[in-house]
Amino acid sequence: MSKGQIQLVIRRFLITAALCVFIVATSISQAKPTVLTVTTEPSATVFIDDIRFGRTDPSGKLVVKDLGGARHTIRVRVDGFKETSKTITSATGDINVPLVKTTDPAELAFQEAEKLLARDRSAAADAYRKAIKLKPNYTAAYIGLARALSDSGDSDGALKALRDLIRVAPANAETSAVEGRIYKENGDDAKAIAAFKRSIAEGHGFQPEAYTGLGLLYKEKAEAAGAAGNFDDEATNYAEAAKNLTTALKQLSGAPDASVLYQLLGLVYEKQKKFDEAIRIYGEFLRRFPDSDEAPTIKSFIEQIKKQQQP
């Protein structure tokens, strides 16, 4: 064997060895669950990439599991303190988000609106309007107002709040997602689809609320088509529903709201008669949310599907 051939054999061996090390390291890193501990003020609401992940405990901690990806933006909000954001480059480890007290009247009015929302939407809407009056470019207050009005049945008022926001902050992904939800609830599918798709574009592909809205809309269209005996349209719309709900689920990652999407996606797979896929997604739900109130129901779904699969 010539010297050149020997060098070629050695080079191939080194490349193969390096690939093996890379594959093993990648497998280990993928198998390792991500656990992020956020530490801040007690009872603070924690958002990751604008998705609500929950509130911190009395010690000011919130543990987030199975957070996909590496780079994220954490936003923390709590009464009496200035809302603060922080960028992280790892989904595993500890992150401390210190907050400072606020005397900003607009921010305090917004916080009051958030507290009122659960028990008095009208009073909450007034508090949002006060925040907007004090700070005319307060994006979160406009969106909060639109959601409060929409939930109260005032679609026209909600859409006006969003139009007012667009004048001061155009091309906002959440604005378009809320607009899509309002149109969907009003039965205007064409405008809803356009708004949801615009939201996804404005979010550069990341907008789980819009993907969820599209998934629900196509699911309802599939059900209507099936009831009318239009089975081709039923199949097409179920396929669109599954595609959008799958994307929404991936983007929600470890967020608590993902539990609802697992159930919706499993149901869509059942309607498509993709029973193996339905069992897989229900199984993922049980692994992620083993103590959920819905866990016994999901287990019964799996058992029913397996019975259907028996010859």
Image (cartoon, helix red, strand yellow):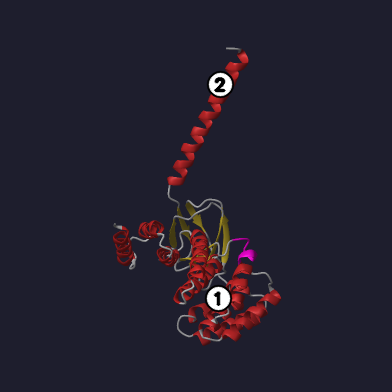
Q: Which residues are magenta?
A: 200-205
Residue 273: tell me if it is visible: yes
Assess disc 2: are there few (<14), some (14-19) or many (≥20) residues with their C-alpha within 10 Å of its C-alpha.
Answer: few
The quadrant in which the N terminus is found is top right
164 inside magenta stretch: no
Q: Position of residue 115 (x, y in %)?
A: 49, 78
Please tell me how crowded label 1 is: few (under 14), some (14-19), or many (20+) other residues with Cα within 10 Å: many
Of the two numbered discs 1 and 2 on the same chain, state the one appearing first in sequence.
2
Q: Which amino acid type is marked by label 2?
A: Ile
Say which residue appears at 46% left-offset and 62% top-offset: 255
Residue 250 spot, x, y in % from top left: 50, 58
Which secondary structure lies at badge 1?
A: helix
Q: Foreground: 171 or 44?
A: 171
Residue for badge 1: 181
- The three-letter code of the residue at mark 1 reads Arg
Task: Kindly check if marks 1 and 2 are in contact, taking CB atoms under 8 A apart as contact.
Answer: no
| Residue 198: percent from left, percent from top | 64, 68
Circle on res. 213 = none
Q: Is residue 203 magenta?
A: yes
Can you tell which quarter of the image residue 189 is in?
Answer: bottom right
The Cα–Cα distance between marks 1 and 2, rounded to whole angstroms, is 61 Å
Q: Position of residue 271 (x, y in %)?
A: 42, 66
Total marks placed: 2
Residue 16 position (above or below residue 116): above
Which residue is under mark 2? 10
Q: Is residue 135 visible?
A: no
Question: Which of 187/175 is in front?
Answer: 187
